[in-house]
């Protein structure tokens, strides 16, 4: 096959290192995988001999029971191969491969160079190989030095060059290959070869077990020459590697001397910092904790890991110096729990970034982000106004996310003293949107609590807790309103008590507003008479002018703001007014006696009676009856046939609006 003295060859490390051993100085027979496999033996040059740069290696190939084999020979940076088939080689045949050895990529490059000629033969059944040892004399060529300018160490705060997938390398010349007499302009075809090796530190690796190689062409930018090459590290596992670059002449010879440039590099497919965000949504009110992990190598001790949620810094100025200084080594990781606290319902984005230096102004790597959702079952609890010893309730509703239903519900009421007073379920067959209530009877005044739970299946299980006031139950214990004469002052006395605990009543405090209302007999409308306030001991008094029979009641403020209750109605009696304005004190038998009186109020159907009795007796006798005049002024007459002393009085009969009214008694002596 034709030979190309300068070609890029990528050789897998597994092939380069497979079954390395030092052979004897004689020709080395091939190792086969099974009886009957092909056998290849190098017949020239002899093992241990010295070869020129261009030489032909001859091999005897015996196919055995194989149909074909591919023979590949590599030596000192050059490679040649050929496939031999049964049609070309019925039994044993001679195969020649031309090789132009170069001194090794990391060799000194002058004088005699030694190395293994590795040849392998591959058949459908397996592979054989051999490693005869040869030497060759390499020519002395010009000195070369190149300087790798990018990527630079300590990139983005790292302690070494860290790459993920691809990186572009750039080089500048310091001295050209064979630069005499022109050291400023490269000769045609001159290049920079770059190789990636497993990391050995600054010590060059032994052998040519490189993982990748590429060639950078020199170009002129403005007045300066530079070369660039792109390497792809995406297939390499994470770890430490070594980059070596070296000048190479147009005919494939490396520069003389140990003029390679070395750069350590770390392949990192994961960021230096990561944040572990659980994808499970949080229920509102849940405290979220995330794990932040840092990976070396970092150029500086971490000074501050800034955490933001939705653009708001959660830990301003938080000193994070506890991150270990050993993070300057690539194999070290450190993790920390970061408290994100609680968040409102919705989608939230969390971002973290590393800052170093004393002023926290140098960012390490790129910020990393995570996101999570905060959801809610939208439990709404509406407490009613609760009073001791009275039926109270909580209005409850909840909403499950789409595709979920609330299949379990519960509530619990806690008395102000912390004892659980009642429990239950607030809805059954709730569906996605549940509504219901919880009924209970508070036992004491104070701050009560509730816990309401809705369960729509994990993780949608939420409890809502809250407090609400329980007020003392205030009541009017008694209303006292004695019967009062029409037109006189009616006094109403009320006694109020507060039930602060079940069956425990105390006087209502002073200063509670009380409104007194009156409803006239035969009507339905309540009329406000006026207001008063309680005094110490829980009593309140109110007066008004008596006009008719009816009922009074009290409207009074409860301990709950804005809540007014009404007392039961109490009957009040207004007696009709009857007054004797003129009557004689003595008279004679059979003489007419005139008694004048006033009676109020006028009411249709009412009558005015004049009554007499023998003084000292109990029985009154009506001696005159007239319809009550509209003017209220009456004149009543009578006469007496028997001498003696008599009592006189005037009565205004009762109606629905006023009870019967009696005048004061007058005395009359009959002569």
Image (cartoon, grey):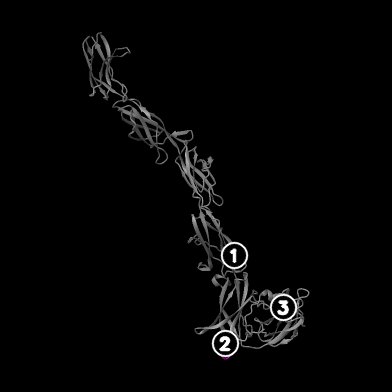
Return the residue at label 1: 324
Where does residue 646 sit, x and y in percent of width and height? 27, 12
User: Which is closer to the viewer, label 2 or label 3?
Assistant: 3
Q: Main secondary structure of the magenta part?
A: loop
Kindly give the residue lying farthest to the left in the view shown. 591
Q: Specify which label sits upstream in the sequence, 2 or 3.
A: 3
Return the residue at label 3: 69
Residue at image position (22%, 14%) is 593
User: Which is closer to the viewer, label 1 or label 3?
Assistant: 3
Q: Specify which label sits upstream in the sequence, 1 or 2.
A: 2
Q: Is residue 602 above or below residue 85?
A: above
> Marks 1/3: CA distance?
57 Å
The span shown in magenta is: 175-184
Kindly give the residue lying farthest to the right in the view shown. 35
- Element at label 3: strand
| In the image: residue 86, left or right of residue 255 | right
| In the image: residue 559, left or right of residue 68 | left
Return the residue at label 2: 188
Quarter placement of the C terminus: top left
């Amino acid at each position: 096959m034709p030979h190309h003295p300068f070609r890029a060859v990528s050789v897998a490390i597994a092939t380069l290192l497979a079954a390395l051993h030092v052979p004897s100085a004689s020709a080395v027979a091939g190792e086969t995988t099974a009886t009957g496999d092909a056998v290849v033996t190098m017949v020239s040059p002899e093992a241990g001999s010295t070869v020129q740069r261009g030489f032909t290696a001859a091999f005897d190939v015996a196919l055995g029971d194989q149909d074909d084999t591919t023979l590949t020979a590599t030596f000192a940076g050059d490679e040649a191969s050929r496939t031999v088939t049964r049609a070309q080689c019925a039994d044993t045949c001679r195969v020649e491969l031309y090789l132009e050895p170069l001194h090794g990529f990391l060799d000194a490059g002058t004088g005699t160079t030694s190395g293994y000629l590795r040849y392998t033969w591959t058949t459908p059944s397996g592979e054989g190989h051999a490693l005869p040892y040869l030497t060759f004399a390499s020519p002395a060529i010009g000195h070369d030095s190149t300087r790798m300018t990018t990527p630079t160490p300590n990139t983005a705060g790292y302690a070494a060059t860290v790459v993920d997938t691809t990186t572009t390398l750039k080089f500048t010349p310091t001295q050209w290959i064979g630069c005499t007499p022109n050291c400023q302009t490269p000769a045609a075809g001159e290049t920079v070869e770059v190789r990636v090796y497993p990391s050995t530190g600054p010590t060059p690796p032994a052998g040519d077990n490189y993982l990748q190689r590429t060639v950078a062409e020199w170009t002129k930018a403005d007045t300066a020459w530079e070369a660039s090459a792109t390497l792809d590290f995406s297939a390499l596992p994470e770890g430490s590697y070594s980059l070596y670059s070296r000048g190479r002449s147009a005919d494939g010879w490396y520069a003389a001397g140990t003029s390679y440039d070395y750069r350590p590099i770390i392949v990192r497919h994961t960021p230096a910092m990561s944040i572990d965000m659980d994808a499970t949504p949080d229920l509102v009110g849940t405290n979220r904790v995330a794990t932040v992990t840092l990976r070396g190598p970092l150029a500086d001790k971490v000074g501050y890991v800034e955490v933001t949620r939705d653009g708001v810094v959660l830990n301003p100025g938080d000193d994070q110096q506890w991150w270990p200084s050993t993070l300057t080594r690539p194999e070290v990781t450190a993790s920390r729990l970061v408290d994100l606290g609680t968040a409102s319902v919705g989608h939230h984005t969390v971002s973290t970034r590393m800052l170093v230096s004393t002023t926290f102004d140098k960012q390490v790597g790129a910020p990393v982000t995570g996101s999570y959702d905060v959801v809610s079952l939208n439990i709404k609890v509406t407490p009613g106004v609760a009073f001791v010893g009275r039926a109270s309730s909580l209005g409850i509703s909840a909403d499950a996310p789409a595709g979920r239903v609330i299949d379990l519900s519960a509530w619990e009421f806690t008395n102000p003293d912390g004892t659980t007073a009642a429990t239950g379920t607030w809805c059954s067959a709730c569906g996605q949107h549940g509504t219901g209530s919880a009924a209970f009877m508070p036992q004491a005044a104070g701050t009560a609590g509730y816990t309401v739970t809705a369960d729509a299946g994990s993780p949608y299980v939420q409890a809502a807790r809250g407090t609400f006031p329980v007020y003392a139950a205030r009541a009017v214990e008694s209303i006292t309103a004695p019967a009062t004469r029409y037109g006189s002052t009616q006094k109403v006395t009320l006694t109020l008590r507060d039930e602060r605990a079940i069956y425990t009543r105390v006087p209502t405090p002073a200063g509670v507003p009380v409104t007194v209302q009156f409803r006239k007999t035969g009507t339905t409308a309540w009329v406000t008479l006026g207001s008063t306030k309680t005094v110490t001991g829980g009593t309140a008094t109110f007066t008004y002018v008596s006009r008719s029979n009816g009922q009074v009641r009290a409207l009074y403020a409860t301990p709950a703001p804005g809540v007014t209750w009404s007392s039961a109605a109490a009957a009040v009696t207004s007696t009709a007014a009857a007054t004797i304005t003129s009557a004689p004190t003595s008279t004679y038998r059979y003489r007419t006696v005139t008694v004048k009186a006033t009676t109020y109020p006028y009411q249709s159907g009412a009558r005015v009676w004049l009554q007499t009795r023998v003084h000292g007796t109990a029985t009154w006798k009506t001696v005159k009856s007239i319809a009550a005049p509209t003017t209220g002024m009456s004149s009543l007459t009578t006469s007496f046939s028997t001498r003696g002393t008599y009592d006189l009085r005037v009565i205004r009969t009762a109606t629905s609006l006023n009870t019967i009214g009696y005048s004061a008694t007058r005395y009359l002596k009959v002569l």
